[in-house]
Image (cartoon, grey):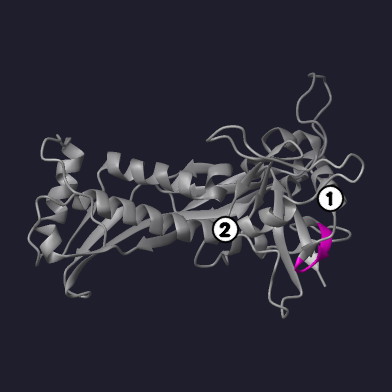
Amino acid sequence: MNIPMDNPNRTLDADAKKFLNFLRGNPNDQAKIDLPTSISDAITSKIQILSPIKSLAKVTYTSNDRLDVVVDTNDAETSGWITDELIKCEEISAITKVSIHLHQLYAKPRVSHTLLEDDTANVEEFIHDKITTQMAASENKSFLFGDGISQPKGILKYDISLGERKPRQIEGVVGGAPGKIADYTKIVELMEKLPSKYLANAAWIMSRNAASHIRTLKDATNGKFLWQNSIAHGIPDTLLGYPVVICDDMPKVSVPEKEKQCVPVLFANLYEGYQIAEKPVINILKDPFNAKPYVEFYATKRIGGDVVNFDAIKALVLKQ
């Protein structure tokens, strides 16, 4: 267990002191508090950085257990010049509502009584970081594979349409069989499926495994690689001019033989396509009894997510 060492000269603000007093209070007390605002905000901000899907999606904070999102499925222009004509009924009927329910997410970092009593150990930073990394991992996986019942509804939980698309399906392109992407034309075809109005904030989302396959693809007409490496730290690599976001929760290109189909690559504008709703408050319970000889801190928050615009998400499918 790697605990950061405390700096004896540091100064703590009121929120940090409140959190530290809670952590190092009576070791036999079972207590629960809302994390101080600054600490809760810091955890939420860092989770957004650590979770690739969340960093791209639209995030809305709410005090309710449900967020209702109005979705306009009308393909006609929604702005124009005022005339005396009334709004047509079919335009009104194209507006639907998606209800995103918030679910409870938890993290359970543990430390020993000895470390809690050690004034040289920066225990609050350790707990802070553990809550962040544990929650970020669970969140990101749910945004892809969540069942929508006890956690957010994941993008890859929806059916992928490879022909005529039905409502609430993601449009896909067959890019080869499991284990190999056929050629560069499938990547180009996938990119061209995304409507132009979503291209401004579009990105490729894939695992490192998929990236290692795509890096080798060349344009057969000029022999150039489709993939362009970043020229500076902090700037993403690009594929056909659009940024690549590495998300290791995405399926691999190489899958077990029993798998008949996998989706290793998404090309999407997730700010338009995926909506996340969460409460900004994080609760934390100190439990010195159920994980002896450790003290367990049970942190919880409420969060939900769902696809709200299927046109803004396209999928590369490897199918036998």
Residue occupying image coordinates x 80% and y 31%: 77
**Count of all numbered marks drawn on residues in the image:** 2
The circle on residue 248 is: 2
Q: Residues within 10 Å of mark 2 (few under 14, many from 20)?
A: some
Label 2: state its secondary structure: loop
Residue range (magenta): 173-179
Q: Position of residue 319 (x, y in %)?
A: 81, 68
Q: Which residue is mark 1?
A: 184
Residue occupying image coordinates x 80% and y 44%: 191
Q: Is residue 88 magenta?
A: no
Q: Position of residue 187 (x, y in %)?
A: 81, 49
Q: Is residue 174 magenta?
A: yes
Side of 34 where 166 appears, left or right: right
Q: Quadrant of residue 301?
A: bottom left
Residue occupying image coordinates x 61% and y 32%: 231
Amino acid on which the number 1 mark rests in the picture = Tyr
Is residue 68 shown to the viewer in this render?
A: yes
In this orientation, which residue lies closer to the viewer: 160 or 214? 214
Residue occupying image coordinates x 16% and y 37%: 12
Distance (Cα) linking label 1 and label 2 = 22 Å
Side of 241 where 307 appears, left or right: left
Quadrant of the snapshot with the C terminus? bottom right
Looking at the picture, does residue 35 appear above or below residue 157?
Answer: above
Quadrant of the snapshot with the N terminus? bottom left
Q: Residues within 10 Å of mark 1 (few under 14, many from 20)?
A: some
Is residue 207 shown to the viewer in this render?
A: no
The extreme front residue here reads 223
Asked whether disc 1 touches disc 2, contact meaning CB atoms under 8 Å apart, the reply is no
Amino acid on which the number 2 mark rests in the picture = Asp
Label 1: state its secondary structure: helix
The extreme right residue here reads 221
Q: Quadrant of residue 241?
A: top right
